[in-house]
Image (tube, rainbow, N blue to C red):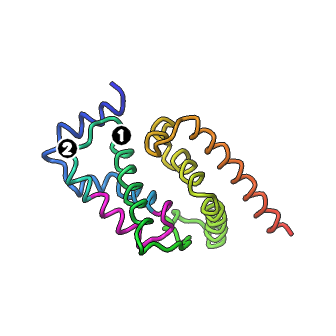
């Protein structure tokens, strides 16, 4: 049985007992991160993530198992973000204050260097056009299969591959430029 079919059966068999809290516990961080990736706003991501889980809970019976639950939630998230961006309240803001999980016991210098490196990578990612940033993170961060990325974005697998290739090339260029500036 495929993972998607198993995922579907798991949710269908427990639909009555599925709770909003269970969905949020399992997928909350990923949904919030995806909303942040698309909006670049912590506050907006908070609101969108809440809306996504409320909608998912109210419409759990519409989940048909054609994709994983995560992909279904990402699809709802993406639609919420698109609707938000169409609203009069949308403003482009770049916020790079990601939550960092503290490592067990690195030195203060190691923490600073790791955070600075992570910041520079995320700055480069956030400079990518949204269509490249989105496929890159779906592939690298969420390890989604190309077919699911294509389904989520309503584009062909060939387009996903093309965007992924171009996103990686742009990242290489951005990182090389950042390193050359640091080295000067």
- Residue 89 inside the magenta-drawn segment: no
Q: In this view, does 170 lie to the left or right of 102?
A: right
Query: Going by the picture, which residue comes out furthest to the right?
Result: 184
Q: Tell me: residue 58, above or below residue 51.
A: above
Residue closest to the eye, 165 or 9: 165
Q: In this view, does 8 lie to the left or right of 123?
A: left
Where residue 61 is drawn, which disc sits there? 2
Q: Which residue is drawn at 60% across and 38% down?
A: 161
Pointer 1: residues within 10 angstroms few (<14), some, or many (20+)?
some
Q: Residue at x 39, y 50 (%)?
A: 74
Query: Going by the picture, which residue comes out furthest to the left?
Result: 16
**Helix, strand or loop at mark 1:** loop
* Numbered marks: total: 2
Q: Name the residue under label 1.
A: 68
What segment is highlighted magenta in the picture?
Answer: 36-53
Q: Residue at x 40, y 69 (%)?
A: 87
Of labels 2 and 1, the one closer to you: 2
Pointer 2: residues within 10 angstroms few (<14), some, or many (20+)?
few
Query: Going by the picture, which residue comes out furthest to the top?
Result: 1
Where residue 20 is drawn, which disc sits there? none
Q: Quadrant of the N terminus?
A: top left
Q: In which quarter of the image is residue 43?
A: bottom left
- Residue 52 inside the magenta-drawn segment: yes
Q: In this view, does 74 lie to the left or right of 128?
A: left
Query: Where residue 4 sits: x, y (%)?
Result: 35, 33
Determine the main secondary structure of the stretch shown in magenta.
Answer: helix
Q: Which of marks 2 and 1 is nearer the N terminus?
A: 2
């Amino acid at each position: 049985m495929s993972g998607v079919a198993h995922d579907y059966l798991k949710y269908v068999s427990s639909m009555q007992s599925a709770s909003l809290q269970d969905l949020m516990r399992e997928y909350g961080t990923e949904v919030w991160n995806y909303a942040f990736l698309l909006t670049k706003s912590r506050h907006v991501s908070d609101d969108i993530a809440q809306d996504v889980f409320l909608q998912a809970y109210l419409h759990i019976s519409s989940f048909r198992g054609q994709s994983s639950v995560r992909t279904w939630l990402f699809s709802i998230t993406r639609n919420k973000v698109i609707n938000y961006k169409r609203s009069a309240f949308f403003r482009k803001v770049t916020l790079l204050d990601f939550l960092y999980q503290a490592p067990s016991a690195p030195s203060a210098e190691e923490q600073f260097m790791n955070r600075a490196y992570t910041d520079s990578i995320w700055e480069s990612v956030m400079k990518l056009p949204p269509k490249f940033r989105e496929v890159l993170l779906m592939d690298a961060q969420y390890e989604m299969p190309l077919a699911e990325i294509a389904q989520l974005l309503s584009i062909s697998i060939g387009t996903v591959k093309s965007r992924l290739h171009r996103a990686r090339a742009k990242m290489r260029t951005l990182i090389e430029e950042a390193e050359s500036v640091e080295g000067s």
